[in-house]
Amino acid sequence: VNKEKRDLDIERILVALDASPHSVSALQAALKLAEQLQADLCGLFIEDVNIRKLADLPFAQEIGLFSVTRRRLNIQELSSQLSAKAGEMRRYFEITTEQASVRCTYREARGRVEMEVLAAAADADVVILGKGAWSPVDIGEVGPAVRRVISDLGISALVLQAGASLQPPVLSVYDGSEIARKGLQVAAALSGRDNGHLTVLILADDAREGRKYQQRAEELFGDSPLQISYLLLTASSIARLGDLVEQGRYGLVVIPAQSDEFDQEMVMGILDDVDIPVLLIKESANR
Amino acid sequence: MSATNHSLAAEELFQVCDPQELDFETTEDLEQITSVVGQERAVEAMRFGLGIEDGGYNIFALGPSGLGKQSIMRRFFEEQAEEEPEPSDWCYVNNFKDSKKPKVIQLPAGVGAEFRQDMEELVKQFSTAMTAAFESEEYQSRRQAITEKTKEKQEEAFRKLQQKAKEKNVQLVRTPAGLVVAPVHDDEVLSQEELEQLSEEEREKLKSNVEEVQAELQEIMQQVPGWQSDVQEKIEGLNEEMANLAIGGLIDRLREKYADHPDVVQHLDNVQQDVVENAEDFLEGEQNASDLMAALQGGRGQRAQQRKGRIRKYKVNLIVDNSEAKKAPVIYEDNPTYQNLIGRIEHIAQMGALMTDFNLIEPGALHKANGGYLLLDARKVLLSPYAWDALKRALQAGKLRIESLRQSLGLISTVSLEPEPIPLDVKIGLFGDRLLYYLLHQLDPEFAELFKVEADFEEQMDWDSDNQGIYARLIATMVAENELMPFHSEAVARVIERSARMVGDSEKLSTAQKQIKDLLSEANYFASQSGNDMVTADDVQQALDARINRADRIRDRMHEMILRDTVLIDTEDAEVGQVNGLSVIPLSNFSFGRPTRITARVRMGKGEVVDIDREVELGGPIHSKGVLILSGFLGSRYAREKPLSLSASLVFEQSYSGMEGDSASSAELYALLSALSGKPLKQSLAVTGSVNQHGGVQAIGGVNEKIEGFYDICQARGLTGDQGVIIPRSNVKHLMLRRDVVQAVENGDFQVYAIESIDEGIEILTGEPAGERQEDGSYPEGTVNYLVEEALRALAEKRAQFGSDSNGKEES
């Protein structure tokens, strides 16, 4: 574990929470990951600053989720509801991490979500986010706030939607880059110690380059007890990545997000399309 | 009349059982007896009770304990049950329309267990079949198609709205309780200050945009429940279709198997309907694992409980399983509490609350005995709160309704069940003592209707040569059944003699089998201690002696007080107005006699005999009656034509506790006659017997113990040959005295006198003739009766004289 921890360079995991079902899944995944990598876990509950501003707006009206009726926002009532939500999340964090074997801390913040996450991420190696957290409605896509966080984040991020959990088998995309190599290491660590199964998706311009990358990957894994299989996807077919992931029934996809092959738009597209957790590997800016 | 005429010979004091007459060497030579001994009346009653099938002909076996009422009744029940078929199985199953009222299913013996097993297998197969069906690609695809379509519709609507909002510089913001449409700039909601900085036109524009998006949002949100409802309906339809496909075949196989049992088929229909209606329950993965509130409330534990609940409701609670039975059941319930009789409904703690269902219905003794026989100890039933009422209610209704006692008394509000009643067909055999039977008969009007057969058990049987042989076989049977060493014929004879002594009658034998069995076991013990391989008469005697030795501490202390002259009892010389009476003190299993000094004093009075013990309420009513009879006797015999002008006081000296019975009334009369006549009574004799108004001496109880009690005192002080006991002649047949007493009488060291009248007694006690009334109406001069009459005449005259003197004084 210590060797893995050293190699992977993941010592501190930040999970950003908003008391939605997405956050519940994010916290469970974060704890699992922290225990697997023996990293510290920091829970950060962020109350979106926009919410409290609503009460001051003269023409803003709240439409009840159940009643579907309009009503004026009352700042005191809103404050109580927000406090209750925060308390709920705090209790859930305490219950979830009660038996944890790693150090777990929790704090609350109020502000712009991306600002708060980015600030907290300065001390972290990985950030874990609920796909639809801080979204007004769940439309199966990455929420605006999370989208902004991912765009600006300089470190790895795990994004997962409500109800999803972190489990093998793992699919890791390898395009020969250094960041993709790091992704392979993380993927191997998350595939289980013995007899785990890891699929490496080689992303190359052609078959020749693909074989070269596969050879590199095989060298990297050496005599690993993992069962490793390789798939080849040419760079021109990268748009099919989402379909491949969906069809393969994987539990986690690891993508080298800072690689040349993946621009921001493509990363967001993959995140929007797939329902399973996606780990975006970036070179840690904090190291 | 000489005292010798009344003296009994040694052979009259004890009825010997001659081993020669028994005609066997040991009990091994005897054939065991299968019939009931000495209980012809009870046996006939039980045969009648068992034969008659009308309701209410339940049997009450009455008699003292130890007569074998329970074992004999059980034997008869078992014999009858052998001829009757095994009864039905009874199962409780869930009532899918109202789970608080479980349904009962009656099945032939053995089919119940099969049905239960089949249902358990079916439920297991349900899980597999349902899981397979609901996890199948087909189901998942069809379900996903239903949900995705709606989800996409919903997401598309919101996506478009969000797009539109963005175009209009507004944004949807989620609050804890709802959604708000707010003006934004650079993804940040405008503050009030920022809003105020805008021009009026811009503000109006924004407001209009907000309202437009808000209206659209509201419209979409109003459609959401409808969409979800459509999805739910479609999923339910799909689930129903899949569930029917999954389990229909499985249930059909059972329907075919149980086609002859319509209740089972009906239940299977209900099960299928319920499984289909609740198909969603079988979908483990459908719960939203990421629901924060569910997680906080321990949702997983709740789901596990729900899963258990799902399986439980399809189970079969076989409360009566007769699969192993070959005949009608015979049940003895030794703890007949309310719940042990009629069954109970258990509860289990679930999430902090007490819950129950039909699986927790437990049968009672009446369920187990249904279609057969139930034996109950009446006293135990009556001592158990509400058990008697419950038993009567069940018998009267002919139905067995399980009802929680706490519920019926309104003591608890926890949810309970009302199981469908079971038809009851049972013959009850109650057993108890006579007092209980007669009290129930008198005080409980329903008792006579429900227990119409009384099987009255005898405590004794005639001791004749036929019965002696039967009794020996009974002993041999007990020896064999209890795996004791064989009893020699002399030992058997000793047991038979003891049996007669137990009932205090030389012409009867005890039917108290339990006590006889105890004696046999104890004799067997002493034989084994002596290393014998056979029980001898000595072993039986040793057992009897040991039994007395264990129990006679109080007797020894009382006798010791007499021998140390703490309690004054003379056993020699003669005294006026003083006689030795005899009483019996019954302890647990042991009774003994002890002498008591009775004294009488007379003076002039108004014809009253004062019983001092009665005055201080130490004497019971029968004792008082005996004393009052004395006045009648004295008046009628000695003062027919003159007033009975004496005042006599009688007392049991050194008596400090209550006494009852009239067995000392003759002794009291002797003391009175002695006091009146001035003739001293022999203190070497003790007296027992009740007296009637004609002076006749009548039988009393405990004659053996009384004689032995006085003998023990005399023997301890040294037998003189003058000592003895006067008993009523009618008690001679009850004599079964100890061997040492009989031996003393045989040696002439002790006497037992049997008399019929007071005159005979007074002659023995005074050594003087009593005197018979002559033709002139007087008694011969010098006789006891003459002296008594003279004394009474003198008292009457003095009283008359005293009265006239008084009157004269008053007149003067």
Image (cartoon, coloured by chain):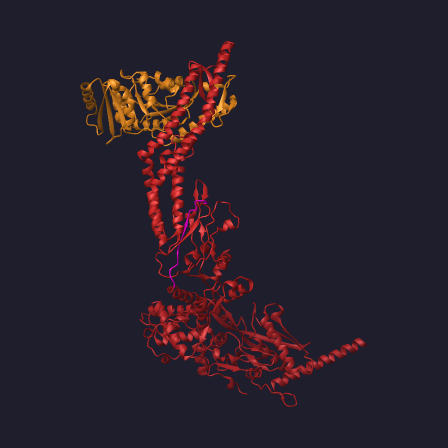
Query: Toward which corner of the image does residue A234 lie, by quadrant?
Result: top left
**Chain for colour red:** B
Q: Nearer the viewer, residue B733 or B366?
A: B366
Residue at image point 61% right, 76% down: B629
Q: In this view, does A185 lie to the left or right of B4?
A: left
Q: Position of residue B318 (x, y in %)?
A: 39, 51
Q: Nearer the viewer, residue B16 or B128?
A: B128
Q: Is residue B669 left or right of residue B546?
A: right
Count of marks placed on residues = 0
Q: In the rendered structure, does residue B93 fall within the stretch colored magenta?
A: yes
Q: In this view, does B782 lie above or below A23?
A: below
Q: In this view, does A173 lie to the left or right of B525?
A: left
Majority SS type along the magenta span: loop
Could you tell me if residue B384 is visible in this image? no
Q: In this view, does A277 lie above or below B197?
A: below
Q: Where is residue B293 in the image (x, y as percent from the top left)?
A: 43, 31
**Chain for colour orange:** A
Q: Name the quarter where the C terminus of chain B is drawn.
A: bottom right
Query: Toward which corner of the image does residue B777 lie, by quadrant?
Result: bottom right
Could you tell me if residue B612 is visible in this image? yes
Q: Name the quarter where the N terminus of chain B is drawn.
A: bottom right
Q: Position of residue A178 (x, y in %)?
A: 24, 18
**Which residues lie in the magenta part?**
B84-98
Residue at image point 35% right, 60% down: B326
* Residue positioned most to the right: B812
Q: Which of B788 and B716 is in front in this view?
A: B788
Q: In the rendered structure, does residue B510 fall within the stretch colored magenta?
A: no
Q: In this view, does A257 lie above or below B360?
A: above
Q: Where is residue B532 in the image (x, y as percent from the top left)?
A: 31, 71
